[in-house]
Amino acid sequence: MGSVNIKISEAKKGKLMTKGADLGFETIEEYVGFILDQVLEEDEDSEDEVDEKEVRERLKDLGYI
């Protein structure tokens, strides 16, 4: 399996790490889904751009979705 690299701001990364530690997930897939939803969510403060269609296509190619 391959990997997907997504550039996100340090602030968003910190927020995701804090949120993830406080939430309980029964499976890795649930946690990954949560993180992807958060990363792909438009962040008005961020200057980082994520092409959601490209990321979703790559995730499909890798068998994640």
Image (tube, helix red, strand yellow):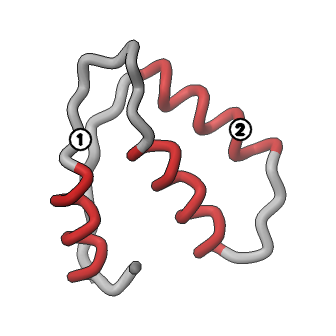
> Could you classify mark 1 by the number of other residues whose Cα lies within 10 Å: few (under 14), some (14-19), or many (20 or more)?
some
Q: Are marks 2 and 1 in contact (CB under 8 Å)?
A: no
Against 20, residue 3 (above or below) is below
- Which quadrant of the view contains residue 39? top left
Residue pictured at 69% horizontal, 33% vertical: 18
Q: Where is mark 2, residue-wise? A: 19
Alpha carbons under labels 2 and 1: distance apart: 21 Å
Q: Is residue 61 above or below residue 11?
A: below
Q: Which residue is mark 1?
A: 50
Residue beneath the point at 44% across and 40% down: 41
Q: Please tell me which residue is depicted at 26% across the width and 52% down the height of the picture.
A: 52
For label 2, the crowd category at 10 Å Cα-Cα, with few meaning under 14, some 14 to 19 and many 20 or more, is few
The answer to whether residue 46 is above or below residue 57 is: above
Depth order, front residue of 1/27 = 27
In this picture, residue 65 sits left or right of residue 29: left
Q: Amino acid at mark 1?
A: Val
Q: Tally the marks.
A: 2
Q: Amino acid at mark 2?
A: Lys
Identify the element where label 1 is drawn.
loop
